[in-house]
Structures are given as C-alpha cells and as structure tokens.
Amino acid sequence: MSANPQAAATEPLLLKQDDAGVVTLTLNRPTQFNSLSQALMSELQAELERIAADERARVVIVAGAGKAFCAGHDLKEMRSDASKEFQKQLFRQCSKLMLTLVRLPQPVIARVHGIATAAGCQLVSMCDLAVASDNARFAVSGVNLGLFCSTPAVGLSRNVGRKQALEMLLTGDFIDAQAALARGLVNRVVPPEQLDAEIRKLTDSILAKTPVAIKLGKQAFYRQLEAGLEQAYELASEVMACNMITADAQEGIDAFVAKRKPQWQGR
C-alpha cells in the first residue's frame, strides 16, 4: 500500500496476473477497502469481457488488495449525486458486472479475506466458487445506513436459505467465515497463509478438465436454475447431447475405458 496519496491515486485500480491460464484480477483500492467505484467497476467489466473472448484463459480469480476483499459501493461517490437517474445508472452498472461474472465462460473464484460487505458480499455470491480465510467476515450492512441491500440480496438469496439471507439483510450483522461456509456462501475456509494454496487446488482440478465441458456445464448450470423442472431437464438433456458429441467427450470416455490419461483437444 502506498503511503503517498498522490502516488496511490496514480496506481491502477485493477491489477491483472496471468499464470498459465489462471487469471487473477485484484481490486486495487486498498485504502478504500476496495470499494466499487464506477471507475473500478468499468475496468473490471472491460477486463472480464476481454477474458471471455480469450480461449487461453481457463479460470478467473477475483481478489482484493490490502486488508479487505471489498467493502461494497463507494459511499462518497453514491452521495455525490442525489438524482434518481444517477443512482439507477450506478446500480445498472453494478448489475451488469454481476451478470457478466455468471455469463463468463470460465469459472470465477472469489479469494476472500478481511471483510466482504454489501456489494462486496454480493460479489462473493456471484462468483461461481469462493474460498475464504478464517478471518473473513461477511455482511449486507446497508440497512444500518438506511439503505436496504436489495441488489446484494439477489446473489445472497441464491446462495443461502431465505431465512438466513433475510436475517443478514434485516439486521446488517456480520457472519464469520465458518457461518458463511455452513450457509453455502463460500466453498472452503482455511487459515490466511493457506488461502492461495487452497485456491490452487481448485484451479489445478479445473485445469485438468476439458474447457469444452466446463464452458457448456457452467452455462447450463445457471440456465437450468432459473427454469421450471421440466424445462430444466429439457435444457440439460440438450446440453448433454451436445457435450457427448464433442471430440473431448469421446476422447475422455475412450481414455477411461483404456485406463489412460485423456488427451484433450479443446473441442
């Protein structure tokens, strides 16, 4: 973290690292606990759109610089314009960003440490997977400021049970990492020093699979969730049939029968 405010202002809002197909995007507003300013959301949106078109990118990790993952929206920015149109544009921008995470062909993993509050908690909920350090804390705390977290509620309510989600939304209280794990908001909880190693276990497992199946499967997973039961099975059957005729699925089955390691072709 830069001790010089002028130097901090010139640092990039978003850091990117590509390690053999694992792309890490780090929110880089540490002195503001990585709050989601419009500028930061724009940079993250643009980078995700670039990644979506990059077949070399296999997994995306979203992380936060400094002491926290993300403290939600930039409150000073939110108060800079009281017009309804400004507020609608702000939340439309955020909603588009959250939907982009879901629609991204690659799996997205949240790397959570410190606090994840309001839209920061929403960001965790909209990533496909989440690994948290045992010192992480989560809240949808807007209600404490007179602002019910309605948009974070969309992702939260699709991760945890209704009563658990509403308790968080109505009280604004924090839950710890173990509670987040028990409620389904995160996949794994580890000590801070093991956070990157635990995420690496997930990325290694995903990288060992064919990207064709991962892409088809992620898209189908979210589509069937929003469908009725019969429609969900119709959709899933179509996707399974399309998956089955790919070269990689045929190679995978042949390799299993022959007791050898599959050689993925990416198609």
Image (spheres, rainbow, N blue to C red):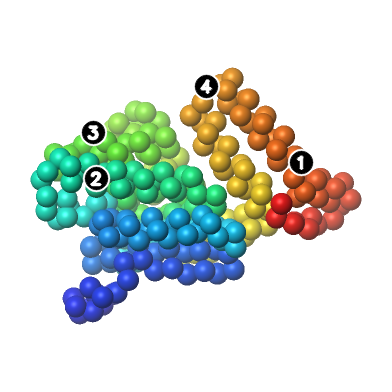
Residue 157 point in image, percent of width and height: 38, 34
Residue at (69% x, 35% y) in the render: 240
Which residue carries the number 3 mark? 170
Which residue carries the number 1 mark? 245
Left or right: 80 with respect to 261? left
Query: Comparing marks 4 and 2, which lies closer to the viewer?
Result: 2
Which residue carries the number 4 mark? 228
Q: Which mark is residue 89?
A: 2
* Closer to the camera in the image, 137 or 252: 252
Looking at the picture, which amino acid does disc 4 mark?
Gly
Left or right: 167 with respect to 79? right
- Mark 3 to mark 4 CA distance (whole Å): 29 Å
Secondary structure under tag 1 reads: loop
The answer to whether any part of residue 56 appears in the image is yes
The tag earlier along the polypeptide, 3 or 1, is 3
Query: Comparing marks 1 and 4, which lies closer to the viewer?
Result: 1
Looking at the picture, which amino acid does disc 2 mark?
Gln
Left or right: 105 with respect to 266? left
Disc 3, disc 2: CB below 8 Å?
no
Looking at the picture, which amino acid does disc 3 mark?
Leu
The tag earlier along the polypeptide, 3 or 4, is 3
- Mark 1 to mark 4 CA distance (whole Å): 26 Å
Residue at (72% x, 34% y) in the render: 241
Query: Comparing marks 3 and 1, which lies closer to the viewer?
Result: 1
Left or right: 188 with respect to 93? right
Disc 1, disc 4: CB below 8 Å?
no
